[in-house]
Image: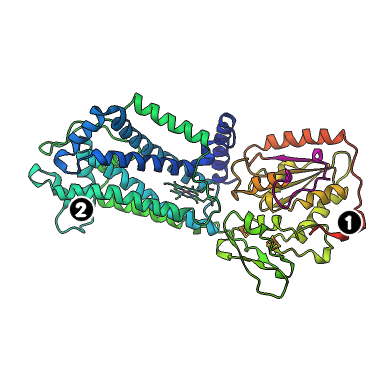
Amino acid sequence: MGLKQRLRIAWERLESAFTRSFGPAWNPFFQLGALGWFFYWIVAVTGIYLFIFFDTGVTNAYQSLEEITHAQWWAGGVMRSLHRYASDALVVVMTLHMIREYLLDRLRGPRWLAWVTGVPMIWFVFIAGVTGYWLVWDMLAQYVAIVTTEWFDALSIFGEPIARNFLSPTHLSDRFFTLMVFAHIVVPLFLLLVMWIHILRMSDARINPPKGLAIGTGATLLVLSLVFPAVSQDPANLATVPATVQLDWYYLNLYPLFDYVPRPVMWVLTVGFSTFLLLLPWLPPRRRAAAALVDLGNCNGCARCAADCPFNAITMRPRSDSLPYEQEAVVENDLCVACGICAGACPTATPFRRRSALVPGIDLPQLPVRELRERTLAATAALAGPARVLVYGCAHGTRLTALQQPGVATVELSCIAALPPSFIDFVLSGGHADGVFLTGCREGDCHHRQGIEWTRQRLAGERDPFLRARVPRERVHSCWSGLARTTVAVRQLTAFRERLAALAPTERGVPAAREEAGHA
Ligand code: HEM
Ligand code: SF4
Ligand code: SF4
């Protein structure tokens, strides 16, 4: 097992601890992007309030902020603290979100756009934070101003060194300060624009955390603001050099390095690291599976595939052939992550159809539905003894090798929702196994975003194509244990088999008429 895989398992274990406390829906790790949006809006709203009372001239900035903080501590003071703490929280969730997407390998293929847009977002967040500290115009602001401008002067792109602005009171320019105010407003607007591009390729991107989680985090920030209000340090004094300042470790964590590392080297490090991040989606190991393929002759234009695709890769267009349907599905190859969820949604992807005709309206080249049927039959053919179970699992969750044991066969799919529900009916009504065990990623965190939710809804009869009512539900079990909790999956499989052993075994042999009839 490689280092990244080990780290991923450790990370998933950490997240599991949160699932135990918060439940899958409220686990903050599963909602990091949504929490990022939530904190952004808190920062924006509180920022607008502060701006109303803030004096944007360098001479009065400090004083106006003191008044906001103390004279109206119950409104302006709380707003200021919320502004600070929500910004800090944004850095925390952004960093965790980036590490997480990397460890869970959600940056390759069409996901490159989300990853690559994430990199300028990091810069924008930090520029907004640094310029924010600058506006307070206290000792910390003076320190930030001097270090930052000296860093930019190392680029020699300005005719006159801008750090000179902060060397003596006579040089201090009001216009330069106003420029910082402008940057502090414009950069977050750019950030918002890139945040919108960031989620463009995802259908129903989670940009709002669940209500309970939002109330909980919002209340925590409010309590923090009341107990530890954000205040300024001593006013800036250009006649002195700031000797000791209290740093903000969320935004200014790199600043102590400037004492030891030459400015040009800091440029090489920051730009080099950003470039490395930008290239990550294309670095080895490269994996790019073929996109889903539409077979027009079998597509009736029902649009279920388009509704279920988590990456907006399918559009419904007017029919281009002579079949009597209004629409046809069209896959945009550059957007398709090859999850196979569309094949799982297609009503023509049923194993009850004749083998020769088993070409559905949409299919995955690497595991076509016909092949899935062959694998299902081959895997179950050797099953013997009581409580025979067929496990369908996804390639990103529980390792199927850990579940293999006498009386249990496994079939792996790209995503559990790539399994058309009719396969479960096929296996049980044909007596190919006594039970079907579905496993994959963790609830609330499907690698392909919506696979677990669609599977749950299909089994519950809430989403087409649903599992037929005639399928005995006591013979179907779902276990969302993920990669790290293999023992949970093994335990649930054992318990499931014990329950199956108490039922009468299913009878092998599919009635010919049903095999021919089809479900489409
Ligand atoms: C302001 C900071 C950020 C916010 C608010 C944010 C927000 C989001 C949201 C809402 C999603 C969609 C989640 C879903 O519905 O499945 C998402 C996905 C994603 N984000 Fe971010 N993000 C931020 C920063 C970053 C950074 C810095 C990176 C990496 C450099 C990154 C990489 C990704 C990737 C790769 C996905 C796609 C995941 C997938 O396809 O399943 N994000 N982000
Ligand atoms: S689900 Fe199947 S039949 Fe329906 S539009 Fe998509 S490809 Fe066509
Ligand atoms: S395989 Fe199907 S569902 Fe998955 S991304 Fe491609 S088109 Fe969408």
Would residue 61 appear left or right of 414 to someone viewing this image? left
Instruction: Count the numbered circles shown.
Output: 2
Which quadrant of the figure has residue 231?
Answer: top left
How far is the residue under mark 1 from the one under mark 2? Answer: 78 Å
Where is residue 340 drawn, in percent x and y? Answer: 66, 57
Question: Which one is in front in this view, the residue at disc 1 or the one at disc 2?
Answer: 1
Disc 2 marks a residue whose amino acid type is: Asp
Most extreme residue toward the bottom, as rendered?
Answer: 322
User: Quadrant where the N terminus lies?
Assistant: top right
Q: Which of 11 and 481 is in front in this view?
A: 481
- Seen at 41% across and 52% down, the residue is 119
Disc 1 marks a residue whose amino acid type is: Arg
Residue at the spot of label 2 = 153
| Residue 91 shows in this picture | no
Where is residue 69 drawn, in percent x and y? Answer: 25, 30
Q: Which of 404 and 58 is in front in this view?
A: 58
Rendered view: 280 above or below 502: below
Where is residue 471 drawn, in percent x and y? Answer: 82, 45
Magenta stretch? 459-479
Rendered view: 475 above or below 310: above
Would residue 506 appear left or right of 6 to someone viewing this image? right
Type of secondary structure dominating the magenta stretch: loop
Q: Which colour scheme is used?
A: rainbow
Which quadrant of the figure has residue 219?
Answer: top left
User: Quadrant where the C terminus lies?
Assistant: bottom right
| Residue 131 inside the magenta-drawn segment | no
Where is residue 254 drawn, in percent x and y? Answer: 32, 42
Which quadrant of the figure has residue 403?
Answer: top right
For residue 286, which numbered disc appears in the image? none
| Residue 442 shows in this picture | yes
Would residue 225 appear left or right of 520 to someone viewing this image? left
Would residue 476 appear left or right of 479 to someone viewing this image? right
